[in-house]
Every structure is written in structure tokens, then in C-alpha cells.
Amino acid sequence: MTMDRSGSPARGNSNDHLRRHNLSVILDLVHHERGMSRSQLTGRTGLNRSTIGGLVSELVDRKLVIEEGAQSSNQVGRPSPMVRPGSVPVGIAVNPEVDAITLGVVGLGGVLITTVRRSLRSIPTAAEAVAVAAEMVDALRPTLAKTHRIVGIGAAIPGLVRSSDGLVRLAPHLNWVDEPFAALLAKATGLSVSAANDARLGARGERAFGAGRGIDDLLYVNGGGSGIGGGIISAGRPLGGEAGYAGELGHTMVNPGGTRCHCGAIGCLETEVRRDLLLGVTGLTPETLGRLASELREPQNPRVTEEVERQVAFLATALRTAVNLLNPRLILLGGFLAALHNADRSRLGDVGALRASAEGLEIREAELGNDLLMIGAGELALECLIADPGAFTG
Amino acid sequence: MTMDRSGSPARGNSNDHLRRHNLSVILDLVHHERGMSRSQLTGRTGLNRSTIGGLVSELVDRKLVIEEGAQSSNQVGRPSPMVRPGSVPVGIAVNPEVDAITLGVVGLGGVLITTVRRSLRSIPTAAEAVAVAAEMVDALRPTLAKTHRIVGIGAAIPGLVRSSDGLVRLAPHLNWVDEPFAALLAKATGLSVSAANDARLGARGERAFGAGRGIDDLLYVNGGGSGIGGGIISAGRPLGGEAGYAGELGHTMVNPGGTRCHCGAIGCLETEVRRDLLLGVTGLTPETLGRLASELREPQNPRVTEEVERQVAFLATALRTAVNLLNPRLILLGGFLAALHNADRSRLGDVGALRASAEGLEIREAELGNDLLMIGAGELALECLIADPGAFTG
DNA sequence: GGAGTTTGTTGACGGAAACAACCTATGGGA
DNA sequence: TCCCATAGGTTGTTTCCGTCAACAAACTCC
């Protein structure tokens, strides 16, 4: 509405923005809490209850929320009806990987409605991935059309993604360099597409609906077969940095005498702390990955203990640096890092950061598991809806 | 600014907040740009010119801004009057150090009006520092009372400060542990006091009025006689983390074979990159510090070159980690780190971060020099005024 | 069943900004 | 010098939105 010619965003607020903001705040609360009573909404927003009434009924008209009959709540006074996320608007999550493309349909409240996975014979080019994803979206459309409306697409990419336009700068394992994935997918589907790094979206997912709920400053670190990624939430917001590349904890230097990383540096966290080394000493394979946590916790072999200690020490070093730099309240570990943490909680319990920075710190394992990327990417897809519910008409 | 808090506090916005927000936006623009014409204000805020007229005249009435006669501006059309920061409201900056306490009077627009420094014979306890600072404030009061009004106090502390209440958790060189400095000073002066780490305020100062103007993602790193501190600005906001301790870049691990740091870890940046070592090889003393930059740039002695190379390599390692983690657009180096940078720009020109993260990166020297802490702390003192100009009456 | 409590509903009220005219002020270029 | 483009001032109207107060509804406890 109020666009600005000088580049920087307009910062004034008109009456129009006020309503939009309030609608957004309410929808955001209902979405993230998966339902709140009207009286809770008045308490949380500080708005008058008649105002809440008006705003909620607008959201109901737009089919963004539904009102349920009041529940018996053992409290005196008139019971307040529950406002729950509506099921009409959905976002589509897309996650291209080396051997498959996964799609998810995600509704408000972080509900993963459907997941579809298509295996691939070879590593897809960006164009191929777009074609397959678009085809999968088209296949979903007839079913969805009956009861849902697609708001947009969020893509979780295993690589560096420029946030401004969804350009994939580098996805090493897909062999993508400077591929305009989001733009291509938008053109192929006619939907608005946002893309971001998978670990960054993992952080969003855990913060919104996982182990990081309600925590404003957290760090999510994920260990996968191809490396270590991270995502930072600061003051309740995802921290992207200048272009969206922030969070690359895997390239923290932890061992100057280590091996050279594909990034050019030596002794990065992800060259020292590696899943394949753990699989090697435990005799597991990517197929039997599920047993990794228990094998590490009850090692059958001194070499396992040794390797766990080695990797945990490096992980602790990297986390120490991150804690000193970011002062998070919570660190969430995902993938094989969760297994490492599980195996040696004592060592990771105190990473040795500055006492003040560390004293409020908790280190836990991520919660959302396999659904995490779908939920995080869905969050990205639904973001613009929540920012401006007024633009949506069910 | 005051609008979006994604935490639990009330997040709704009433009509009242709207006016407050708009006043705040305008005052913020005028403050940080040190003056804008009314037509520029309409452009930047997107508000109607009659609205701007009303808001500006309220700010004029409150003596927060003044309007100057229009300037001749090579443009056709009626010239627009300049709106400049008013000189009435001032903040007081306080900086306790081991050998002195410095006070500054800072006005809107980041103008440092006065500086007063009182030397100390010995390292002050917190109580002593509070007493001296309060005395100095009282000495300033009669003069200031004629033409100014004190809005509050901002303190720059060489240590870890809890942002919620200004408790100094640890200031190693002052030997302070858990001293409620802000609360004590507030009680002694009757003014509202905020406190923060000095490097964090340096980052704010440079971002507001120094080399970081207009840059939303930057990292400021300062090297002093007692160590290395840092401050992060992310998405235009100071990054504090859970309790305000974020930014401790000095404790990034850069050398596992290094010496033990007072923080307990080994090989921290600040144990390897040290001003005293540079002074040692150049034969300078803290008193002749001014010549450090030139001595490093034109080394008279191979040992200087060697030490510079050693330190620059460690600094580059720490910056690499920070760039990968934060993806800033700008790194500003202050103190002796600026001299190091000056001595070996080529090495620091590319710290070896991920290509995408590094490509938009610039490394420069800080600009504000001696006034930096005063300006940063003044910014802190004036913060609540700018957030809610309606509460101020000249 | 009545008292007390909490909450939704309704309509009047006031604040704030947009918008529309219309006029004035100022400076550049033809 | 005149005309035009830009910008501010003033006044009124319109629109939107949140608050407020009074009332109605629904539940608990005695």
C-alpha cells in the first residue's frame, strides 16, 4: 500500500496498518498456540474484548479461524469460546534432496496434513527438481481444491539460499550453483514461493511447534549425512544476516590441525564431527541409522567411546563460541548431534562458555524429527498470510 | 520499534499506540539523519503531508525538534523546511574505567555536547564509581538546567551487563562481580539508568552515527588494553541474546595450543591477539599508543611483521567464524584491531568465509574514535525518549 | 435459586489519519 | 517577466478503529 520510492521501507503507520497488525497478531497467536480462548486473546494482546470480538469475527469470515463452543472450564463466569486455526488455508512445503523430493501440505497450527515423497534415480538438476515438484503440486491440487486454499510454497534447501529472491547460491550435494529455484518453481506453479536453508527452517519449526516454543533466543544445530547446519532465532525472529546465509555453524573452526573442508578452510566443525565416522566405528550404515543413538549410549567397543569423546569435544568447542557470541537460552540438537548429546550429556552440559552467558543455557534434543523440515517450510509458506490476514479471502 | 515484540507481553495496538509510533518514527528519523526536510519525511514514512505537519508541530511543541527556514536546494519548487533535532533533551553517558570516570552530555542527533573526566587514584568499587558519577552529574545539573532537560543515563561498562536491570555480572578489570550498578546510580541520581557492555554500545554508536550508518547487519569488534569485545547489530537492532551478554567475540577459540584465558578456556581470540604484545615488539607504551598504527604499517623490525602476521591470522579465523555464523554486511574494527587491519589489509580482506557469506562483506575501521562510547551510551540513554516522544514535555 | 463473576454484545464516542479543495510560497526555466 | 512545478497551510469531511459503559448471557458457589 504505502510503497516507498527511496528503497528503504516506509515506516509510518496509518490506520490501515493498525487493523492489519492487530489481525496479524491474533492470527499469529492462534496459529502458534493452536487455539486460544477469546478471553485469553484479550489478556495477551491487551486489546479490549469488544475489539477482539470484531477482529475474531473478521478472521472467521475469512475462514482463517473457527470458533468452537465454549468448553466447561471449571471457572466461574461465562465460558469463553475457543478460537482455533481454520483448516482452509494451507502452505506447501517442498524439500528437494539428492534421492527424492518431498512435499508436505501444512495447515495453520503447524498441522502436517499430507506428505508425498517421490524417489529419484539420480541427483536432480534444479530444472528437474522444479518440474517434479510442480507436477506433484498439480497432482495435489484437485484434492485440495475442495476444502483448502493454497497460500504459497516454502522450500527447504540443503544449501545456501539468498533470502531476497530464493536464489540457491550453493547446494553442494545437489551440485546446484546459483540456481533460481524459487523463481522457477513460482513460474511453474503460479504460486508464490519462498526458499531458505533447511537448517534455518528447522530452527523456525522447532521454535514454532517443537522444543523451542516460547523461547526467543535459541540456536538449532542439525547433523546430517552431508554436514552440519544451523539456524539462529534471536529476539523471536529468525536471524538471516545480510542475505540469509547466517547460521553456518558447521564452518566454525575447531581444529587447526584438522582436514581441509570443501569451504576452503581447515578444521571446520563439519570436517571433524561427522556422521560417517560414527557409522564407521559402530558398524552401522545409513539404513540402520535408527540404532545410532543406542549404540553410542552403550558402546560395545572402546573405539566408539573414543570417537564419541573426540567429536563431543569439538562440538562443545563450536557451541562454546556460539554461546559466547549469541547468548542463547536454548540450544537444540538434531540429527546425529542429538545422538552424540544423548551419549555424553555431562560433557555437553557445560560447554565452558563465559559463566554469565552459560548460566541460563539449556541444551536439549530437537523434537519434531522427520516432520521438522515440512513444518518449518510450511511456516515459511504461511508467513505472508500471517503477516497480512486481511489479504486472504477463504 | 515499540510495536513488534514477539514475546509474551501485550502485543496489540490501540489507536493510542499509533500516534506514539508515528511520533517515534519521525523523531527517530530526524535523530539519526540529523535533520530531514518535511517533504523527505513524507516520502520516507509514507504518511500524508498534513499528517506529517501535525506530528512535526507536536514534536516542536515538545521541544524535541526545531524547524529551520527552508534552504535553497537546487531543486525547482518550494523548498521544504528542515526539521532538526532539538537541543533541549539530553542523555548522560557514563563510562567507569579503572583509572577514571568519564561523563558525557549527548543530545539528539548524536551530538556530544560536553565531556567531563575525573581521574581516580585506584580502581573504584561499584559504590565509589556510583558516588563519583552521581557527584559529577550533580555538578553538571545547574548548567544544564538552563537550556536542557536530562532524559536519562546510559552507562557503558567494561564487562558483562544484564540488560534487564543493568546488573554488572562481571567486570574483570574493575573487579566487580554482580554489582547492581544501574540500580545504585538510579537511586543516587533519581534518573532512569540503563547499562550495557561497552563494545555493545560501540556497535550502536557506529551504527547510528559512525561508519555503520544505514547498515542493518554489522559486527563491531574492539581491541583494548584489557581484551577484545564485540557488538552485533542484526536487522538493524542490537543483538543482545537472552540476557544481553551476546557479542563476546573475544572468546572465540582460535588456537587450541594457546594459553589459558581468564574465562577458563584455552586459546581464546583475546589471549592470542593482544595489544600488549604489539606494544612489546614495537617498543611502545600505552602512553605512546597513538603511534601504533604507523609502527605496524611500516615495521622497523622483522619481529613486528611476524607478530602482526600471527595476530592477523588469528583475528581472521575468529572473523571467519563470525561471518559464517552471522552473515554481516560490514565488520568494523576499533582500537588496536584497526591498527592491525591497517597494517595488513590484504590478509583481512578475505577472511576465508563461505563465498556467499563473504561476498557482500566489507571490513572497515571504526570512525568515531574517542567519542564512540559516549555516543553509544547516549544512544542508550535517549532510547526511551525516542520510543515514546509523547511522554516528554520540554 | 440467588449472588457473584466472567465474558460476549451492542451502540455511542472520540481519536487519528486520509482525502479533497483551495490558496500561498518559492524558485527555475522559457 | 511569466509560467510551471513543487511544497506547505488551512479547513472540512470521511473513514476506520479501539474504547467505554451498559446490558445480556452463562457458569460456579453457597
Image (tube, coloured by chain):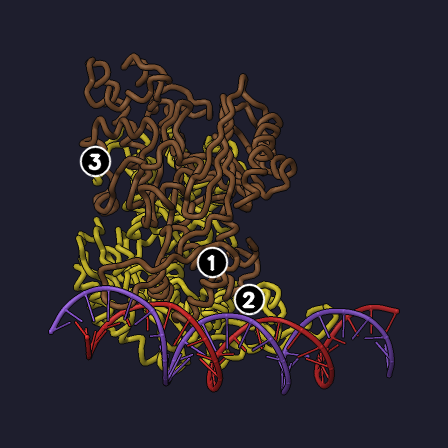
Chain colours: A yellow, B brown, C purple, D red
- What is the spatial separation of the Cα atoms under label 2 and label 1, in whole angstroms? 12 Å
Instruction: Characterize the local packing of mark 3: few (<14), some (14-19) or many (20 or more) Cα atoms within 10 angstroms.
Output: some
Split into 4 quadrants, where in the image is the N terminus of chain A? bottom left
Q: In the displayed structure, does residue B333 sit left or right of residue B241?
A: left
Instruction: Characterize the local packing of mark 2: few (<14), some (14-19) or many (20 or more) Cα atoms within 10 angstroms.
Output: few
- Label 2 sits on what residue type? Asp
Cβ atoms at labels 1 and 3 below 8 Å apart: no
Q: In the displayed structure, does residue B348 sit left or right of residue A216?
A: left
Residue tagged 2: B16
Question: How far from the left and from the top, in percent, is residue B93?
Answer: 50, 37
- What is the spatial separation of the Cα atoms under label 1 and label 3, in whole angstroms? 39 Å
Cβ atoms at labels 2 and 1 below 8 Å apart: no
Q: In the displayed structure, does residue A40 sit left or right of residue B88?
A: right
Residue tagged 1: B24
From this view, report whether residue B393 is shown above or below residue A296. Answer: below
Q: Pointer 1 indicates a residue of which chain?
A: B
**Residue closest to the eye, B360 or A114:** B360
- Eye-nearest disc, 1 or 3: 1
- Label 1 sits on what residue type? Ser
Split into 4 quadrants, where in the image is the C terminus of chain A? bottom left
Question: How far from the left and from the top, in percent, is residue A185?
Answer: 23, 67
Question: How far from the left and from the top, in percent, is residue B29?
Answer: 39, 55
Residue tagged 3: B349
Instruction: Characterize the local packing of mark 1: few (<14), some (14-19) or many (20 or more) Cα atoms within 10 angstroms.
Output: many
**Residue closest to the eye, A180 or B225:** B225
Q: Is residue B246 visible?
A: no
Q: Is residue A81 visible?
A: yes
